[in-house]
Amino acid sequence: MKKKAYLCPVICVLMVMNEYPSVLLERAVAQMSSLPGVGRKTALRYVLGLLRRSPEEVETFSSAMTRLKNEVHYCRYCHGLSDTDVCPICASHSRDKHLVCVVENVQDIMLIENTGQYNGLYHVLGGVIAPIENVGPKDLEIDSLVDRIAAEEIREVIMALPTTMEGDTTNFFIFRKLQPTGVRITQISRGIAVGGELEYTDEVTLGRSIVNRIEMKG
């Protein structure tokens, strides 16, 4: 309780002054606020919180971030994050190797795994087709997905992309790309609200959407 009482007045004063008493503090806040979803007020709270920690705790925090950046791997099969060249999911002998779920990012894998309703493999695209943001098919892991279909014994591809215009565009593009392979292509049911991201969908709804997936037809 004392920490909150101490930090809040400091944050309010600094925000009202619109300046910082230390250049180092200002730089730290600028870096923290560059993270997605972190505004300057929240960044200032985080930085002041770090200042109140011991040097050992800050060193542990800094070391974790540095090691994450320098040592994390992207699985050579699914492109998800891993501590090794092949992620635990792709390396597992208990997963259904004939089933691949296509997702936008690594967070989506974590969300789907939490539902407990899926036991296949994944393929991370690294985004969705978004012309306004200059993101095209070549910027995503679409060609590597096609290669996986040709090289592995995959029988079904589940499209689990956001129900947005960009997600639907990517769904359609991949569907056309995979049609000649003869693989079964399905997509999660519209239990996910139109215009919604998987990130904001509860686990029960997401799990049902995967179980009740529908066939994609041209």
Image: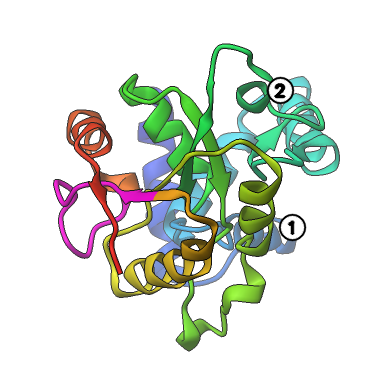
The amino acid type, in three-letter code, at marker 1 is: Leu
**Within 10 angstroms of label 1, few (less than 14), some, or many (20 or more) residues?**
few
The amino acid type, in three-letter code, at marker 2 is: Glu
The quadrant where residue 108 appears: top left
The quadrant where residue 34 appears: bottom right
Tell me if residue 14 can be seen. Answer: no
Residue at the spot of label 1? 24
Give the percent coordinates (x, y) of residue 173: 45, 72
Viewer-side residue, 45 vs 110: 110
Is residue 184 shown in magenta? no
The segment highlighted magenta reads 185-197
Secondary element at tag 1: helix
- Position of 142 with respect to 147 (left or right) is left
Viewer-side residue, 42 vs 97: 97
> What colour-coding does the image apply?
rainbow
Rendered position, 170 above or below 193: below
Rendered position, 80 above or below 10: above
In percent of the image, x 33 and y 58: which residue is there? 162
In percent of the image, x 82 and y 32: which residue is there? 85
